[in-house]
Amino acid sequence: MTLNRRSMLKAGVAAATLPLLGSKAFAQSEPLKVGFMLIGTVNDNGWNFGHAQGAKFMKEQLGDLVAEPTIVENVPEGPDCERVLRELAQSGHKLIFATSFGYGDYVIKVAEQFPDVTFEHATGYQRSANVATYNARFHEGRAVCGTIAGHMSQTGKAGYIGSFPIPEVVMGINAFVLAARKVNPDFTITPVYISTWNDPAKEADAARAMIDQGIDIIAQHTDGPAALQVAEERGIVGGFGQGADMSAFAPNAQLTSIIDHWGPHYVNSAQAVIDGTWETGDRWPGLKEGEVQIGPYGPKVPEDVVAAAEAVKNGQIDGSFNIFTGPINDHTGAEKVPAGVTLTDAELLSMDWYVEGVIPPA
Amino acid sequence: MSLELTIAIIVTVVGASTPILIAALGELVVEKSGVLNLGVEGMMLVGAITGFVVAFTTGNHYLAILLAAAAGVATSMIFGFLTLSLSANQTATGLALTIFGTGFSALAGQGYSARPVTLLGPLFPAELATHPIWRVLFGYSALVYFSLAMVFAVWWFLKKSRAGLILRAVGENDLSAHSIGYSVIGVRYAAVAFGGAMAGIAGACFPLLLTPQWAERMTAGRGWIAVALVVFASWKPFRLLAGAYLFGLVMTMELYAKASGGPLSAIPAELWSAMPYLATVVVLVLISIRRDASTNAPACLGRPFLPSN
């Protein structure tokens, strides 16, 4: 429908003969303005880079249906983001993606004032008539990484650099440890939270602190490759790229990477807004839908470990394997999830406890 | 705690402290001349991207450090021209310089984020640093020894040299210094340029000493810690040295404590991050309680020089 009107417009027929309809058609077929609000910079090679790539993918796929996406970088998770959201809404953006957990309250607040604007909040949990949430099942990728870690670690100890102890991060830690302990039941992990998504020097020092205390595998849930570079420099067994392939920074130490591919989701949402079919809800695709991908395996990973990792990956794609199926004990050893029971999405999204094998940060 | 771990911690602390120390030494000299330049963070970022780009394109780390210093000087001259020649407000101009440096470095760094460099290696041959104890003394890159040498150099300059005496006179009483024939503006330009060079080198420490990559805003507030440190140290170079290592120790111990899972890991991360600033506030309180004693703050700090008045 929209396309037909567009082509009519191009031919000049509608505009010339039916001025009223013509102007209406023009208003409707004006390219959709899509805004993206990022916590860091698109050049971080990780989380924000992934969203920027997704925005680019959306523009490539939808062409003239969408305007060149507006990307606002380095927006802190505080009152400032409310201002940015309002500015985006006031400047004609009809679809706004807020891509960090801490934006949640502000998205809900601003969305009330702009009922004709569609908001989507990544990794969040609060929804309303015009606010949807979306995420990707990164923990599925963490399970693949954990499997490799369980096979390859010699000390049986891994370090995990986290930003903040939010469910998103806790879930990743738990999936990693559960997978590693299926291979090595004595495997343990020490999470270190550094209270920032982007402070490369602090990430590197956190990696040094953990390596100096005997870990030989490192994983991180921050936005850049600093920890992997330290892994490369110190020559430990290795680590994992997060958000993007980081092999340029650690050609030997990167065992594999979890790659975010937000593009298809952004295409679907923009198309739904253009068609007027958008509805609120929660979308949480993973490996199966291709929104989470496993990057190439590093040169250190032996054939049999690749095979084990692929088995975990494929099991999650065909649905035969779920990392959060019981029996699962919490960090004190008490049973938390009985055998055969799988945690629901709601339980995952509010996860505030650690599984056995995690040495909890006090 | 084992010897190896102790030494590993010391090595990490030295790395974390060095950029703060270098930047703060520069700011100390600037403030001693009566100028408050809050643009340290911005100048560091310009130094960081310059150091990274030069190291990436030429592979020459020493050239990278030199050009990072030059870039820091160039950035500081914007501040110098506005505040010294045009008598603009120093606080506002310094803040603007930080915003400018952040934006400029991000712009100049476009396309460099997916590219690694190599760290500057140790200054002394590896044979000297084989034993862990020797590693504590001889295991660092030239930037670390430079920072320590500069503590002595700045102390000697301010305390023992004639030029340092003139600089302090300009900072304590600009009109008197002017009336006996010293160029207040000239001295302050030189001090601001020195501060810029040191901030540029401090910025270059990030890609060359700590984490061999370019990331936007990679100094992550260390420039502000350096500014706080100057006050913390009451404008005294050796106290500055102690303060820089204390701040570095706090920042590093947070991570080692958490990684060990021991009792110290119960302290929230936010409190650890706030500690350098809390320490500065405490020192400021202590200074103002002992109002009779000399606070050591330069009397003309932050005041524009207007000889016609």
Image (spheres, coloured by chain):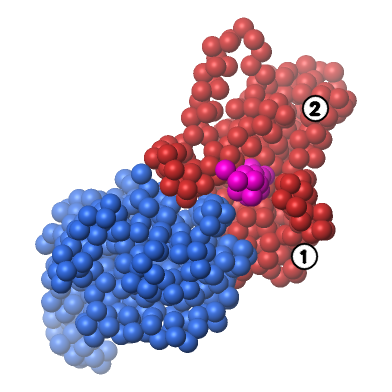
List the single residue furthest toward the right.
B162
Q: Is residue B8 magenta?
A: yes
Inspect this view and state whether residue A2 appears: yes
Badge 1: few (under 14), some or many (20 or more) residues near its Cα, within 10 Å?
few
Badge 2: few (under 14), some or many (20 or more) residues near its Cα, within 10 Å?
many
Say which label, 2 or 1, has the lower sequence index.
1
Residue B304 in the image: x percent, y percent? 65, 27
Q: Depth check: give the residue in front, A65 or A288.
A: A288
SS state under label 2: helix
Mark seen at residue B158: 2
State the predominant SS element of the stretch in magenta: helix
Mark 1: amino acid: Asn
Q: Where is mark 1, residue-wise? A: B60
Screen quadrant of the N terminus of chain B = top right
SS state under label 1: loop
Residue A139 left/right relative to A254:
left
Residue B255 versus residue A28 in the image, above or below:
above
Residue B99 in the image: x percent, y percent? 53, 48
Provide the letter of the chain coloured red. B
Residue at 75% over, 52% down: B131
Q: Depth check: give the residue in front, B237 or A360.
A: A360
Task: Look at chain A in the picture and name its colour.
Answer: blue
Q: Depth check: give the residue in front, B84 or B253.
A: B253
Inspect this view and state whether residue A167 appears: no
Residue at 79% over, 59% down: B126
Looking at the rendered structure, whether the residues under marks 2 and 1 are on a common chain is answered as yes
Mark 2: amino acid: Leu
State which region is magenta. Answer: B1-19
Q: Depth check: give the residue in front, B80 or B163.
A: B163
Residue B230 versus residue A266 in the image, above or below:
above
Residue A162 left/right relative to A249:
left
Residue A305 in the image: x percent, y percent? 44, 82
